[in-house]
C-alpha cells in the first residue's frame, strides 16, 4: 500500500508539473504597475464576458488552468481559469507557504466568465469611485 501511494504521489506531481508551463520565477512579485492594474481593473469583469474582453481589461493572464469537476476519479473538464498573479512566494506548497495575492477568472466551456475570485488583498473603497 505504501508503494502504491508513493507511485500515485509521483504521478500527481508529474501531472501538476506538466500543467504549469509558464516561466514564472519564485518568489514572484508583480511590478508596481502590473499589481495596480490587477487590483483596480478586475472589478470591471462581469459574468458572461469572453476571454478577449477579459484580456482587454486585464492583459494576458499569468497562468491558464483547467477547471475540473470536484470528483476524485475521472473528473471531466468543466472550464478553465485565468490567473493574474500579484504575489506567490513558492510554486508548490500550502496556502501559508505560497502566500498568494491574485485574481482568478473562471470560464465555462462556452468561453464565458462564470466567476471572479480574488484573495490575499483587500479591495480599497476608493477603487469604486
Image (spheres, rainbow, N blue to C red):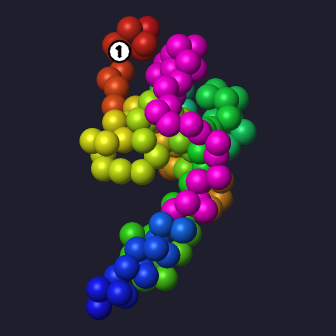
Q: Residue placed at 35% from the left, 87% from the top?
A: 3
Q: Position of residue 11 (x, y in %)?
A: 49, 75
Quadrant in the picture for the C terminus: top left
The quarter of the displayed image where residue 25 is located = top right
| Magenta region includes residue 89 | no
In the rendered image, the vertical position of residue 119 relative to residue 122, given as above or below = below
Q: Quadrant of the N terminus?
A: bottom left
Give the x, y percent position of residue 35: 51, 20
Q: Residue at x 49, y 82 (%)?
A: 74
Residue found 37% across the figure and 79% down from its top: 6
The crowding category of the residue bearing disc 1, from other C-alpha atoms within 10 Å (few below 14, some 14 to 19, many at least 20), is few
Q: Helix, strand or loop at disc 1? A: loop
Q: Is residue 47 left or right of residue 22?
A: left
Residue in front for this viewpoint, 69 or 50: 69
Residue 17 inside the magenta-drawn segment: yes
Vertical placement of 127 versus 22: above or below? above
Image: magenta residue range: 16-42
Q: Position of residue 65 (x, y in %)?
A: 56, 54
Any part of residue 37 in sight: no
Q: Which residue carries the number 1 mark?
A: 124
The quadrant where residue 2 appears:
bottom left
Amino acid at each position: 500500500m505504501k508503494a502504491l501511494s508513493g507511485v500515485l504521489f509521483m504521478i500527481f506531481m508529474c501531472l501538476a508539473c506538466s500543467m504549469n508551463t509558464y516561466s514564472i520565477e519564485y518568489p514572484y512579485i508583480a511590478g508596481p504597475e502590473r499589481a495596480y492594474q490587477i487590483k483596480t481593473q478586475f472589478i470591471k469583469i462581469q459574468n458572461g464576458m469572453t476571454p478577449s474582453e477579459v484580456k482587454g481589461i486585464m492583459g494576458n493572464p499569468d497562468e491558464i488552468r483547467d477547471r475540473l469537476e470536484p470528483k476524485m476519479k475521472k473528473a471531466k473538464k468543466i472550464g478553465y481559469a485565468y490567473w493574474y498573479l500579484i504575489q506567490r512566494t513558492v510554486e508548490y506548497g500550502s496556502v501559508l507557504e505560497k502566500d498568494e495575492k491574485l485574481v482568478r477568472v473562471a470560464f465555462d466551456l462556452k468561453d464565458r466568465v462564470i466567476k471572479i475570485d480574488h484573495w490575499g488583498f483587500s479591495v480599497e473603497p476608493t477603487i469604486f469611485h
